[in-house]
Image (spheres, grey):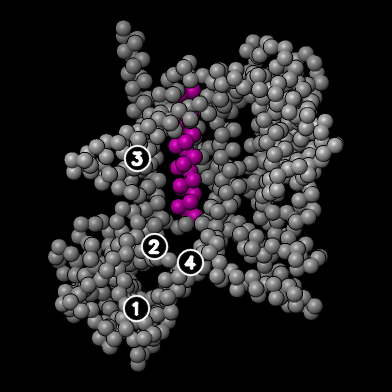
């Protein structure tokens, strides 16, 4: 009885620990976002800490169960630091982290690196990082535990919203208010639910073991072999011209190769004892291994044709690396299949070797050694210099960060040479198009440039309130910021003072932080008032009003702008904060 009680106490403690870890992860990420939004952290430092937090807590939740919580934490902390550091290095290819975030291939590489490394770290604490039975079992169990935790989290949120709807029928919508969109509670609940889901899934490995899934997958080796055999026989007769328009031949072929690798691995199992004894599935798996070089070679040929026609892009560099990894699998599987007896053991050894290769390639992708943007930019510039203007993709260069900017500068220099009028015209047209573009990367560049110019010219009161100013300006669109910049650049009548001022004060007593009132003198002479505040973690726009009914305008408004530029106004204590200037100005909630 005591043993059962001790076990229950241990399980309860682990559930509570993982739920708390998940809640802390949610709260920590929310605090990081708030600090970044308020300008308290540099952009890249914020990105580094956020990446470390996500990887660290994900690794802790995933590895606790096979490992004790303390050991999982000890392994996850330095591992997360290494991967987050690699992501930071990769982000340096772009001037802004926001631009890097649109380049999703680096995030995919980091995710692959984390997923492949975790089973190895678990195995290293037991029989050794190359022990295939442990690697095989932990890889599949990681997928099952993660899926179970995600489903459980969805059920938790479904229950929360159902409870909120029911309480709302009697006028008690407390849950919706408590969760507050953008607030920390929602993230803490999500993190706690994920932690609890991982804990419960880890306690029931006998019920959630992937054996049933593996047994269902094994018979699929036979039909996949049949499909691949028909494909190989029909290929010399039909070619690849039958592919639907716009569908990537390389993508389909790599998908076929990935399916073959997965099924061969499933049939080979973790050891000879558990391997599928069926003769048919064994022969089918060996057949798939022998035919694997065919789709891989065709995928490589398809990528090569695309590169020859259009040059390198980060996506094509990524596809070429996938082909190279698939070629490694194809070669090792072919050699294994030709061994006859013992081919399953050779497949297992091949899988360990290729897992290391996958990790190496994913790591290199995040380092300057394998800078896909630089490779692509050099390729496109070489094509443009060697051929006609029609060969270039200037819009792509805009998306390739610093390497793309260097390439554009090189093209500008080439366009200035005699006989390059067509290139100069294309660059000019591209600049005009880019100015009107709604592309998110371009918009991020425009917004940052306008913000930098606006911060340089717009007076702020108090002068130390720059962090609050930057936080609130982040919620204003680039188009409107440009309008504000033009107002600031137009001096007040009879002076050289800018025609604007940004006043920070505590104007909402029931909300944390400070708010702002922005005064802008328009070219017509009228003064425009804008109100900014934070609620629910987001910037809110509010109307500005006067205690006397009419806000100062024209000459009086210009004089008020000059007055506020000289010194911050006092704030009168009231249910709402009121700027103590002539007429009294308040920000409506």
Furthest-right residue in this view: 236
**Gap between marks 2 and 3, in whole Å?**
25 Å
Question: Who is closer to the viewer here, 578 or 149?
Answer: 149
Assign the N terminus to one quadrant of the image: top left
Q: Position of residue 440 (x, y in %)?
A: 53, 60
Mark 4, residue position: 447
Mark 2, residue position: 475
Q: Looking at the image, can residue 217 be seen? A: yes
Q: Which mark is residue 188?
A: 3
Does 105 sit left or right of 246 as displayed? left
Kindly indicate whether the residue at mark 1 contacts the one at mark 2 (C-beta within 8 angstroms).
Answer: no
10 Å neighbourhood of mark 2: few (<14), some, or many (≥20)?
A: some
Q: Is residue 16 magenta-colored?
A: no
State the SS at label 3: helix
16 above or below 399? above
- In primary-sequence order, the first of circles 1 and 3 is 3
**Gap between marks 1 and 4, in whole Å?**
19 Å
Mark 1, residue position: 520
Q: Looking at the image, can residue 133 be seen? A: no
């Amino acid at each position: 009885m005591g043993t059962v009680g001790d076990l229950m106490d241990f399980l309860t403690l682990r559930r509570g620990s993982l739920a708390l870890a998940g809640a802390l992860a949610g709260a920590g990420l929310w605090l990081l976002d708030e600090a970044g939004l308020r300008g308290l952290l540099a952009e890249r430092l914020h990105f580094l800490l956020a990446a470390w937090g996500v990887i660290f807590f994900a690794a802790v939740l995933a590895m606790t169960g096979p490992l004790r919580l303390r050991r999982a934490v000890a392994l996850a902390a330095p591992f997360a630091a290494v991967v987050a550091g690699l992501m930071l290095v990769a982000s340096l290819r772009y001037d802004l982290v926001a631009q890097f975030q649109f380049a999703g291939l680096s995030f995919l590489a980091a995710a692959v690196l984390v997923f492949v490394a975790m089973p190895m770290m678990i195995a290293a604490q037991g029989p050794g990082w190359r022990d295939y039975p442990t690697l095989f079992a932990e890889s599949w169990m990681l997928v099952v535990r993660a899926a179970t935790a995600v489903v459980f989290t969805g059920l938790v949120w479904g229950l929360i919203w159902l409870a909120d709807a029911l309480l709302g029928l009697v006028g008690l919508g407390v849950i919706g208010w408590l969760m507050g969109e953008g607030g920390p509670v929602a993230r803490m609940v999500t993190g706690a639910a994920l932690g609890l889901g991982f804990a419960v899934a880890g306690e029931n490995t006998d019920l959630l073991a992937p054996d049933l899934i593996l047994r269902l997958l094994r018979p699929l080796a036979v039909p996949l072999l049949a499909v691949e055999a028909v494909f190989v026989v029909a290929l010399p007769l039909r070619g690849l011209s039958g592919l639907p328009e716009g569908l990537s031949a390389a993508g389909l072929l790599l998908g076929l190769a990935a399916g073959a690798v997965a099924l061969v691995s499933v049939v080979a199992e973790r050891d000879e004892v558990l391997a599928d004894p069926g003769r048919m599935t064994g022969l089918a798996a060996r057949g798939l291994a022998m035919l694997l070089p065919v789709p891989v070679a065709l995928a490589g040929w398809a990528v090569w044709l695309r590169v020859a026609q259009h040059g390198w892009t980060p996506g094509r560099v990524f596809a070429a690396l996938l082909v190279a990894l698939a070629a490694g699998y194809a070669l090792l599987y072919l050699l294994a299949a030709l061994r006859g007896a013992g081919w399953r053991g050779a497949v297992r050894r091949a899988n360990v070797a290729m897992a290391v290769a996958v990790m190496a390639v994913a790591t290199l992708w995040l380092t300057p050694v394998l800078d896909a943007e630089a490779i692509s930019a050099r390729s496109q510039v070489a094509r443009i210099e060697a051929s006609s203007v029609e060969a270039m993709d200037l819009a792509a260069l805009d998306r390739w960060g610093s390497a793309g900017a260097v390439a554009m500068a090189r093209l500008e220099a080439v366009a200035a040479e005699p006989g390059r009028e067509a290139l100069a015209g294309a660059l000019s047209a591209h600049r005009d198009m880019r100015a009107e573009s709604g592309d998110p990367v371009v918009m991020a560049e425009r917004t940052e440039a306008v913000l930098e110019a606006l911060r340089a010219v717009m007076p702020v009161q108090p002068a130390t309130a720059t962090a609050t100013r930057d936080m609130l300006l982040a919620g204003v669109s680039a188009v409107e910021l440009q309008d504000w910049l033009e107002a600031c650049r137009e001096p007040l009548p009879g002076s050289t003072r800018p025609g604007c001022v940004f006043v920070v004060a505590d104007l909402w007593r029931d909300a944390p932080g400070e708010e702002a009132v922005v005064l802008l003198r328009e070219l017509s002479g009228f003064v425009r008032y804008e109100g900014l505040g934070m609620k629910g973690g987001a910037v809110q726009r509010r109307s500005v009003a006067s205690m006397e009914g009419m806000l100062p305008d024209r000459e009086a408004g210009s004089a008020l702008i000059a007055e506020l530029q000289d010194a911050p106004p006092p704030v009168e204590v009231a249910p709402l904060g009121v700027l103590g200037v002539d007429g009294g100005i308040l920000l409506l909630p």
